[in-house]
Image: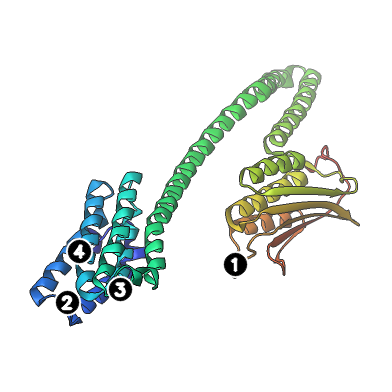
């Protein structure tokens, strides 16, 4: 019901503030000795409410008209009660920032400046009261406020579009990957499985007539089955393997795009890792870099790769805002699950001087990428 009276998308952020502001405005106007008559005060307050309500629902020229009417109403009230009433200009300054037109915002800002010029003229010292009081910074803030709101809303809209584009791209990539897998399965396994089928039919025919020949066919089936199994392993390995070096290169480009400088230090010779181990570490690094871009507000990030005894260590450090108490997201949990699957560990800590450090530790088993266990 309330969403029909007040925009649903603004209820969470603005409803309480707007209600409190309007109650205070009504109280100040109706209790002031210098206010116009009761009927005049009610007319002005009604005009204020009408302007406010129209401004809630529109983002076009009607919003500009509502803002200008609201500022004019506040100007009239301020000429009776005094400059303190100009504090309520923030209501319309905020609305102005939600406009779709930069020209409308510019006109509204000019109206705010005019309001702060006209009302002090009623005072004994005229404009001197503006320049020598707190009204000046309030005026400046109200003039800047619409620009800030406009930029924030524009950024959110662009981020929303980017998220949608990323989702569509992800679906497209998944579709392409499915098609590639289907092609690989058809081209690689199709012929092998057809051979197994034919050999099985031959073995079934020879089993009674010539057991020796049937045995030879069964040997061929066994050999062909091993080939098929190797082909499946190769396909799975190709689909899942992610190189740590390529992931670090990709991370460098990602951080550079976000304005974050990446430094990579490799201490000693890198160990031989299985495909699964390297892929899990690469995915953990990817998750850490994504968190840095999204949440850290960092300017620099360093990655240190080192082998200490029989432990391969990957330390990722940034100079951002550090950890928020009690807020370890899904990305950290994903890293822990990946490393636990390899009997490794993940430690996340805040630096005393700001920033976050993520330490990945993997026990080494001394086998290479060709290990069947991979």
- Dividing the picture into quadrants, the one containing residue 126 is bottom left
- Dividing the picture into quadrants, the one containing residue 103 is top left
Q: Name the residue beneath numbered marker 1.
A: 324
Left or right placement of residue 85 versus residue 288 in this view? left
Q: Name the residue beneath numbered marker 2.
A: 35
Mark 2 lies on a secondary structure that is loop
Judge depth for marks 1 and 4 and give the one in front: 4
CA distance for labels 3 and 2? 21 Å
Q: Name the residue beneath numbered marker 3.
A: 125
Q: Residue at x 75, y 43 (%)?
A: 244
Do callouts 3 and 2 mark residues in contact (Cβ within 8 Å)?
Answer: no
Which of pointers 3 and 2 lies earlier in the amino acid sequence? 2
Q: Name the residue beneath numbered marker 4.
A: 73
Q: Is residue 310 above or below residue 167?
A: below
What is the crowding at mark 4: few (fewer than 14 residues within 10 Å), some, or many (at least 20)? many
Quarter of the image for the C terminus: give it.
top right
Find residue 204 and report its horizontal and vertical position in percent: 69, 22
């Amino acid at each position: 019901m309330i969403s029909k009276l007040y925009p649903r998308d603004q209820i969470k952020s603005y409803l309480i503030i707007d209600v409190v502001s309007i109650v205070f405005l009504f109280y100040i106007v109706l209790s002031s000795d210098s206010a116009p008559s009761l009927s005049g005060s009610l007319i002005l307050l009604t005009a204020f409410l009408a302007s406010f309500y129209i401004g809630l629902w529109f983002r076009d020229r009607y919003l500009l008209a509502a803002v200008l009417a609201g500022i004019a109403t506040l100007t009239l009230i301020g000429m009776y009660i005094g400059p303190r009433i100009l504090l309520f200009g923030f209501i319309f300054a905020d609305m102005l920032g939600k406009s779709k037109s930069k020209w409308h915002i510019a006109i509204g800002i000019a109206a705010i400046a005019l309001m702060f010029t006209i009302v002090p003229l009623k005072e004994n010292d005229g404009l001197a009261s503006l320049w020598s009081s707190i009204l000046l910074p309030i005026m400046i803030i109200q003039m800047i406020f619409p620009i800030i709101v406009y930029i924030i809303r524009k950024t959110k809209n662009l981020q929303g579009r980017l998220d949608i584009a990323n989702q569509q791209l992800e679906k497209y990539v998944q579709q392409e990957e499915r098609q590639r897998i289907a092609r690989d399965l058809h081209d690689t396994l199709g012929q092998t499985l057809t051979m197994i089928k034919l050999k099985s039919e031959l073995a079934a025919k020879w089993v009674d007539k010539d057991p020796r020949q049937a045995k030879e066919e069964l040997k061929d089936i066994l050999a062909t089955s091993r080939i098929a199994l190797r082909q499946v392993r190769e396909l799975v390995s190709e689909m899942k393997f992610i190189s740590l070096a390529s992931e670090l290169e990709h991370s460098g480009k990602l951080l550079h795009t976000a304005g974050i400088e990446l430094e990579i230090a490799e201490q000693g010779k890198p160990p031989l890792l299985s495909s699964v181990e390297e892929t899990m570490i690469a995915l953990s690094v990817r998750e850490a870099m994504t968190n840095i871009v999204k949440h850290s507000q960092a300017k620099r990030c360093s990655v240190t790769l080192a082998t200490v005894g029989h432990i391969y260590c990957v330390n990722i450090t940034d100079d951002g805002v550090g950890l928020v108490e009690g807020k370890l997201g899904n990305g950290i949990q994903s890293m822990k699950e990946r490393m636990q699957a390899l009997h490794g560990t993940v430690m996340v800590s805040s630096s005393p001087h700001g920033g976050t450090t993520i330490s990945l530790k993997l026990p080494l088993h001394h086998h290479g990428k060709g290990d069947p266990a991979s």
